[in-house]
Image (cartoon, rainbow, N blue to C red):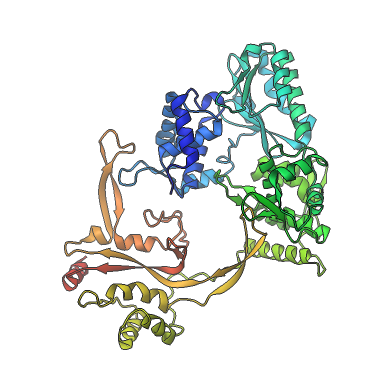
Amino acid sequence: MDDSTDQQQSIDDQAEQAATATAAAVGLSDDEQIRIALQEIVRNDGMATIQQIYNAVVREIGQPLSEQGRASLRFFVNKVAVERGYVSPYDVEKPGWWITPQGRAWLESPNGDNSSGLTIADWQTAINVDARVAWLITDYPQWLAATFQTRVIFEPQTDQRFTVLHNGQVIHKGRFNPTDGLIVYFSSLPDELYQYVQRQLSRPDTVHQSRQGTDWVRFIIYNEADYGLLQKVITEIVNLDDTPSLWEYATFVRQLDPQTSYTASDLLVRAQKVLKGIPTDAKQWATLLCQLRLLTSDDNIHYHVQPYVQGNEQALLRLMVLAYLHPDSSGAERYTLPARLLLPRLREITATQAMHTFTAELRRIAPQLLNWYAEAGFITIDDDHWQATADGLQPLLGEDATMQLYNALLTTLLAEIDGKPNDLPDVTMDEPLPPVRDIEAVLQELSRELIIDEQVIQRICRSLLAGRHVVLSGPPGTGKTELARRLPSLLWREPAQTLTQLATGLYQPPLIEVPEQRHGYAIEMVTATEDWGVRDVIGGIAPCLDSDGRTGSLRYTIAYGHLTRTLLRHFAGTEDGRTLPPGTELKRQDYHDKEGRRYRGIWLVLMSLRVRRLMRRLAVC
């Protein structure tokens, strides 16, 4: 894990030069700061330093944090998130902040996805503001819904805050101040709108544009004239941002030369001549076309058309919808497939449903996805209701290559949803060791690296199959360690297979052929001493410093021994054997080493100079 990327270093340098902001001052609620912290922890494989969390918030707000801002963020992580069980208490033996299964669950829930879970009615009831703007609490959400229908979403949040989104993108955030009125925050405003606000606002002195080269703008609504100004700004932004239809995206790419590579700037210049409402940033435009699986790139600079784009039109539209990649909530350059969530809904619900139920969990991109699924023929829309089409999830008939790819994608998605992913079969819990497939091949492979009597290897194999432990003893340099490392992996190695799997890489096609092989067993090699006891093997109560490591007070926790940790690593959600599996149902998983090799499991191998004395000691344990 890289604790100091170039981008982070640049942010640190800026913070030293001008640290003036708190996250709350630019519209981030307590929960939003915790969400950003958890996303950064997930992005860094489950652990992040406090400096990395600072940097993540700085990237979000676009300017350095003041000392007060840093102190507040430390409080939310070290106190609030710990008390809620989202992160583990600080441990000097494991420096940094570790996310818990409960924290991951909250982050993946609608609450963690930057939402309070409040209804608009509950949110309106909880707000207490000056009577001058109290009417906006009701009028503003109603005006947005009446004017833009499902294109714009009003998302209530805690602390009298809210977010307004259009096609999944934030237009602005806001909060009601008990005395000042309605404070609104725009992530960016075109120059002409910014100048218009400065000229027309009743209190132009409240217009504030961020420093440090970022674009967010803040101003305050005091009266009805200011509210009319806000409505005009929102209308202008929505009109600017109205996006093309799915087929317009496809048509644009189908008109490109399949043999030519294009830069992001080339693509944007061409698109601006024929399309409206597209991103104005060249990289964002190219990325969107890759998310729709229309383009790919070999070097992240030059883009070319995917080979299936010129195929059957209906198949292409449906392929774009099912294969669409949505940015992962972690904030890293990772993507998810919304189709995994939406296809079960299309299969299970046949009656007419209210519009908001289609993509309730994906509220930020709900209007966009709703329109795309209707355009591709998966659903029909009637006023404020939707209904799945009768044949929407049936394969298309034809020999066209795009049809064949779409049918394969649909089949793979449905199989995964049914719990039958195209993967190696699971290793059954507590099943005995399977017979060795080809002992002669194993002997030949070992003989190329080790000179060991074949009879010894066969005896070891028979003992392991019988469920016994094996002790290897002998002078140094005779191959004991290497044999212990190689033999469990080779004896139960499965034949290599090629699997068709869903791909979520930005430049990948929707389906990829993946070579997959499961080796036998990896090993965890530990040097054991003759003074080992129950705590070393099984575990026990151990002291550690308090959560922030500053006061010096002690607390006690369970520290698992080597054998227990090795066993726990076979189950999901144990943080590599450091915690018990969450819930009541154990979920077995394959073990993956640092090189990405996949194993049936992992065995504990003990090394000791005095084996017999150690074995007697362990027998007592």
Q: Which of the 4 image quarters holds residue 393?
A: bottom right
Q: Position of residue 39 (x, y in %)?
A: 51, 43
Residue positioned 30% across, 61% down in the render: 562
The structure residue drawn at horizontal position 51% and vertical position 34%, both measured from the top left corner, is: 57
* 541 sits left or right of 602 in the view: left
Residue drawn 70% across and 63% down? 409
Of residues 45 and 531, the one nearer the viewer is 45
* Image quarter of residue 498: bottom right
99 in relation to 490, above or below? above
> Does 556 sit left or right of 133 as displayed?
left
Q: Is residue 610 left or right of residue 169?
A: left
Count of numbered tags:
0
Residue at coordinates 64% horizontally, 58% vertically from top-left?
Answer: 508
Q: Position of residue 67 (x, y in %)?
A: 42, 25
- Examine the rendering and report whether any part of residue 338 can be seen: yes
Residue 123 pos. (x, y %): 62, 28
Image spot of residue 128 (x, y percent): 59, 19
The front one of 164 and 6 is 6
Q: Is residue 611 toward the left or the right of residue 487 in the image?
A: left
Query: Could you say which is closer to the camera, residue 441 or residue 568?
Result: 441
